[in-house]
Image (tube, rainbow, N blue to C red):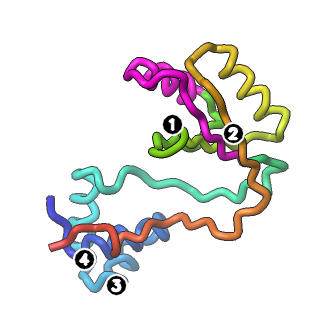
Amino acid sequence: MKLDKIDIRILSELQKNGRITNVELAELVYLSPSPCLMRVKKLQAEGYITGYSAQIDIAKLGQSLTVFTEITLRNHRQIDFARFLSAVEKIDSVIECHLVSGGYDYLVKFMTSGITEYQAIMEHLIEMEIGIDKYFSFVILKSPIVKTHHPLDSIAEVD
């Protein structure tokens, strides 16, 4: 399915407000409600829309710690990457994991209740013998810019 500018506008509006009514969405993208709903259903069926979720103010829930961790593996065979991923995907505190180019292999984002929990997780990962050679931790002090939407207009290929 090739997307057009209206599809991109629909996706942009839905990522800003997933609870918007179809009538409101149709107005924002300059369609009547029926064609708008048909497009949304097609975008869902084609896998462009993968789900809807609530954005939570984590600070209101209690104290938390966010840590970005650079992780380097000892070996770089497929089995080494698979073993590492199998272990970290089971950890609830891992909220992002990216295979990257450069001086290390993975950039992992952890969210924990504090430094003690984070360190216990890292010690457990080391003890598991999953091939971690070294890691560097970067504790987040403040996040002045956090966007919950992607710049679809600049990255989408449209007709």
The structure residue drawn at horizontal position 45% and vertical position 45%, both measured from the top left corner, is: 101
In the rendered structure, the answer to whether residue 87 lies left or right of residue 51 reads right
Secondary structure, mark 3, is helix
Mark 4 touches mark 1? (CB < 8 Å) = no
Give the label, 2 or 4, closer to the camera.
Answer: 2
The residue indicated by pointer 1 is: 105
Amino acid type, callout 2: Phe
The structure residue drawn at horizontal position 31% and vertical position 81%, both measured from the top left corner, is: 29
Amino acid type, callout 4: Ile
Residue 126: % across, % down: 68, 20
The structure residue drawn at horizontal position 46% and vertical position 40%, both measured from the top left corner, is: 99
Distance from the alpha carbon under mark 1 to that under mark 2: 12 Å
Vertical side of 104 occupied by 52: above or below? below
**Crowding at mark 2 (Cα within 10 Å: few <14, some 14-19, many 20+):** few
Distance from the alpha carbon under mark 2 to that under mark 3: 49 Å
In the picture, residue 92 is in which quadrant?
Answer: top right
The residue indicated by pointer 3 is: 27
Vertical side of 67 occupied by 25: above or below? below
